[in-house]
Amino acid sequence: MTTPVLELNNIHKAYGDLEVLKGVSLKANKGDVIALIGSSGSGKSTLIRCANLLEQPQQGDILFQGEAIQFKGQGHDRQPSDAAQVRHLRTHLSMVFQQFNLWSHLSVLENVIEAPITVQGRPRDEAIAEAQALLDKVGIGDKGDRYPAELSGGQQQRAAIARGLAMQPTAMLFDEPTSALDPELEAEVVRVIQALAKEGTTMIIVTHDMKLARDVANHLIFLHQGVIEEQGPPADVLDHPKSERLQKFLSATKA
């Protein structure tokens, strides 16, 4: 059997008394594209942030390439116990955020080369050559000397994707990558994500865009109030929703 790239088992997460995730599990094999959909507050972004330990789950297991992340403490005091494991996980799970999170004082090219040089210790010339190739790949090869504020939102998000890819990650995590963009700029980013999917990039995508979920994902998960309400192939889930909650959610997205 193939070892999954990422496995989340029975993940629980609460903020004080507010329980956001109530035992969620997912498994991403190499080449899988998993789309997470659901209403605001359903736990989608929290789940993906738990996947690379930006948030600490109070219960449940996280396995990266078959290796379980070690934790110490209980409940709200639970923390990863091995800093090297956390570094390894984050180095190989690149995350692209809704608000781009580019460094404003660095040029686009400098944004892309920063982590490969400082975290991975790669030679600067090599990092620059790869960064330029990645900027070309996402369609902004002529913007390397610009600063983030000089770019459109769609260009900034494509720069953020190039920055994530520069780490040569095992998988990519996307947290609402298009929700801050207007439709025209959204289409630019969607094309890049579609191209990555065709190349076999393993991805987990939190999205409000049902067309993106249908077109690029091979597995779709509908979260509702911190649990998985439905999951399966996107066409099955979107065209033949079984639960009343999913039917209502899909009706609202079409309104």
Image (cartoon, rainbow, N blue to C red):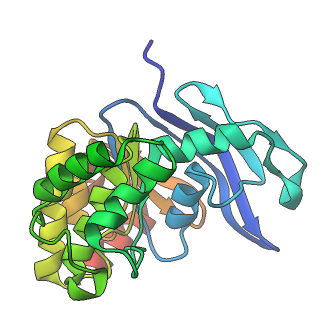
- Look at 41% across and 59% down and name the residue there: 114
Indicate whether 16 appears above or below 91.
below
Quarter placement of the N terminus:
top left
Q: Is 161 or 122 nearer to us in this picture?
A: 122
Residue extending furthest toward the top: 1
Q: Residue 105: percent from the left, percent from the top?
A: 40, 81
Q: Would you place residue 184 above or below residue 235 in this image? A: below
- The residue shown at (43%, 74%) is 101
Quadrant location of residue 180?
Answer: bottom left
Q: Can residue 111 be seen at all in this image of the molecule? A: yes
Query: 40 above or below 46?
Result: below
* Left or right, 251 with reference to 7: left
Residue 229 picture location, percent across and down: 49, 55
Residue appearing at x 76%, y 36% in the figure: 70
Q: Position of residue 236 (x, y in %)?
A: 25, 47
Assign the C terminus to one quadrant of the image.
Answer: bottom left
Q: Nearer the viewer, residue 171 or 168?
A: 168
User: For residue 198, what is the image quadrant?
Assistant: top left
Seen at 41% across and 68% down, the residue is 97
Total numbered labels = 0
Who is closer to the viewer here, 134 or 222?
134
Q: Position of residue 165 (x, y in %)?
A: 31, 49
Q: Is residue 36 visible?
A: no
Quadrant position of residue 83: top right
Q: Compared with residue 156, is residue 125 higher up or lower down, i.e. above or below?
A: above
